[in-house]
Image (spheres, grey):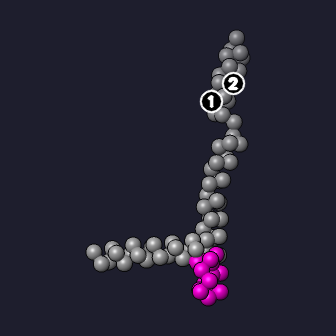
Amino acid sequence: MLKTTLIAATVILGSLYIGFGDQIEFLPENMQTASYNTRTGLTNFAQGLVPGWVSNTKEKPDMFERTNEQLEQEEQDAE
C-alpha cells in the first residue's frame, strides 16, 4: 500500500512540475527552464506522432474509388 501511494504521489508531483514548474517563481531558474523544456519536448513528440498518420490518410485517394475505377476500366476493356 505504501509503495503504491509513493508511486502515485511521485507521478502526480512530476506531472505538476512538468505542467506548471516554469510558472512557480520560488523555483531556481534552472528548474524552471527544465520544466519548460520537458513540456515542449513532450508536446513536440506528441505532435510528431499524430500528423504522421493523419496527413497520410488525408493525402491518399479513397481506396474504394480506385478499386471501382479499376473494375470499370476492366469491364470496358473486356467489352
Q: Residue at x 33, y 74 (%)?
A: 4
Left or right placement of residue 24 versus residue 5 in this view: right
Find residue 64 and name its label: 1
State whether residue 30 is above or below residue 5. Answer: below
Q: List x then y, in percent, for residue 75.
A: 67, 16
Q: What is the three-letter code of the residue carrying label 1?
A: Phe
Q: Indicate which disc, 2 or 1, sits on the residue closer to the N terminus.
A: 1
Q: List x then y, in percent, for residue 52.
A: 65, 53
Q: What is the three-letter code of the residue carrying label 2?
A: Glu
Quadrant where the image shows the N terminus: bottom left
Left or right placement of residue 62 versus residue 17 in this view: right
Main SS, magenta residues: helix
Q: Secondary structure at mark 1?
A: helix
Query: Where on the picture, by quarter, is residue 77?
Result: top right
Query: Where on the picture, by quarter, is residue 68?
Result: top right
Quadrant where the image shows the C terminus: top right
Q: Nearer the viewer, residue 66 or 41?
A: 41
